[in-house]
Image: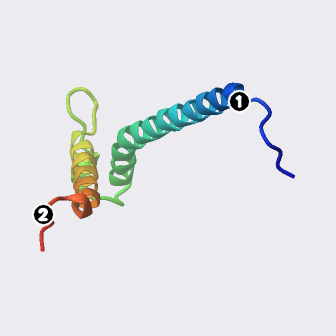
Amino acid sequence: MAEEVKDPGRALPRILVGGTVVILASLVIFVSSANVNFLGLPRVAYGLAQNGLAPRQFGKLDDRSTPRNGLTFIATSLRRRFIERLRPFALHPRP
């Protein structure tokens, strides 16, 4: 089934480069996905508020047509979740 590598001096750098490419691609995908979610969720809240399915405050746009209330809410929620996820790694966790 598995063979011994005939020339590890040539094969190992190729494997490492391939692994690095995969890691970089996954980071780009992660950042892109996070960006889409961060920018898209306030618009979803805006649409829901326009149809009466979310609080009316989310249905307001600022002077640049940005759903500022939804953006603030989503940013605050994501920040809180991120901090909560980091808490187990703190040097002195809260009781």
Q: The C terminus is located in which quarter?
A: bottom left
Q: Nearer the viewer, residue 19 or 44?
A: 19
Q: Nearer the viewer, residue 38 or 15?
A: 15
Picture disc at residue 11 = 1
Tell me where residue 37 appears, x and y as whole percent. Answer: 41, 43
Q: Residue at x 65, y 32 (%)?
A: 12
Tell me where residue 49 appears, x and y as whole percent. Answer: 32, 53
- Real-space CA distance between mark 2 and mark 1, rounded to the nearest whole angstrom: 45 Å
| Vertical relation: 19 (above or below) 48 | above
| Vertical relation: 31 (above or below) 85 | above
Q: Quadrant of residue 19?
A: top right
| Vertical relation: 10 (above or below) 71 | above
Q: Nearer the viewer, residue 65 or 77?
A: 77
Q: Residue at x 12, y 63 (%)?
A: 92
Is 68 placed left or right of 35 in the picture?
left
Outermost residue to the bottom: 95
User: Label 1 sits on what residue type?
Assistant: Ala
Q: Quadrant of residue 51?
A: bottom left
Picture disc at residue 92 = 2
User: Label 2 sits on what residue type?
Assistant: His
